[in-house]
């Protein structure tokens, strides 16, 4: 093996390159780790979830239904016209059960009201969830019924 006298101690470029490689490896290790188990509860909390689909239908244009699940079992959100609130129980790793929900009682355009009624009914029937990246799917009998995208911290 040839020794030209270049080592990390004598060549600052090798030192910088070594540090860069270490930082890059550390960064890759951190970003490849999920913030908990894929689909776990911790990824659900503290985020505003924007409804994208009700069963297989996209949300009505001009509406912005949301859902927020708090770690203490409380929930709240917007149905598109009305605000709603309630509670839920965790059931294992990915199961849940919602209480009957309360909501404000404003009227709105028929398309928005129909969507809101379907959303809240499915929310009360949801029995599980799947979390993948920034997408949350609430399931009824194992099938995705409500699909959300993370829209806030």
Image: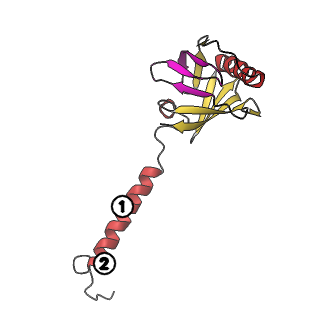
Residue identified by numbered label 1: 23
Which residues are the magenta region? 65-91
The residue lying at 77 percent from left, 32 percent from top is 57
Which image quadrant is residue 18 in? bottom left
- Residue 71 percent coordinates (x, y): 45, 23
Rate crowding at label 1 as few (under 14), some (14 to 19) or many (20 or more) other CA atoms within 10 Å: few
Of the pair 6 and 65, the residue shown nearer to us = 65
Q: Position of residue 38 (x, y in %)?
A: 54, 38
The answer to whether 138 is drawn above or below residue 89 in the figure is below
Residue at 57% over, 26% down: 67
Where does label 2 land, which residue? 13
Asked if disc 1 and disc 2 are in contact, CB closer than 8 Å, the reply is no
Residue 47 appears in the picture as rendered: yes
Along the horizontal axis of the image, is 79 left or right of 28?
right
- The percent position of residue 143, horizontal first and vertical second, equals 72, 28
Could you say which is closer to the camera, residue 72 or residue 4?
A: 72
Q: Horizontal placement of 148 versus 43: left or right?
A: right
When asked about the image quadrant of residue 24, the answer is bottom left
Which quadrant of the figure has residue 105? top right
Please say if 122 is above or below 28.
Answer: above
Q: Relative to 123, does residue 47 appear above or below in the rendering?
A: below
């Amino acid at each position: 093996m040839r020794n030209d006298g270049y080592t990390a101690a004598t060549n600052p470029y090798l030192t910088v390159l070594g540090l860069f490689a270490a930082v890059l490896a550390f960064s890759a290790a951190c970003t490849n780790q999920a913030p908990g188990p894929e689909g776990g509860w911790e990824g659900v909390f503290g985020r505003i979830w924007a409804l994208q689909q009700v069963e297989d239908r996209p949300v009505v244009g001009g509406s912005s239904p949301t859902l927020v699940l708090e770690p203490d079992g409380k929930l709240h959100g917007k149905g598109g016209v009305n605000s709603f609130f309630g509670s839920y129980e965790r059931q294992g790793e990915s199961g849940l059960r919602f209480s009957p929900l309360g909501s404000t009682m404003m009227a709105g355009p028929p398309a928005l009201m129909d969507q809101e009624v379907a959303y809240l009914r499915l929310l009360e029937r949801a029995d599980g969830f799947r979390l993948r990246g920034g997408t949350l799917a609430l399931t009824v009998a194992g099938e995705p019924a409500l699909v959300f995208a993370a829209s806030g911290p």
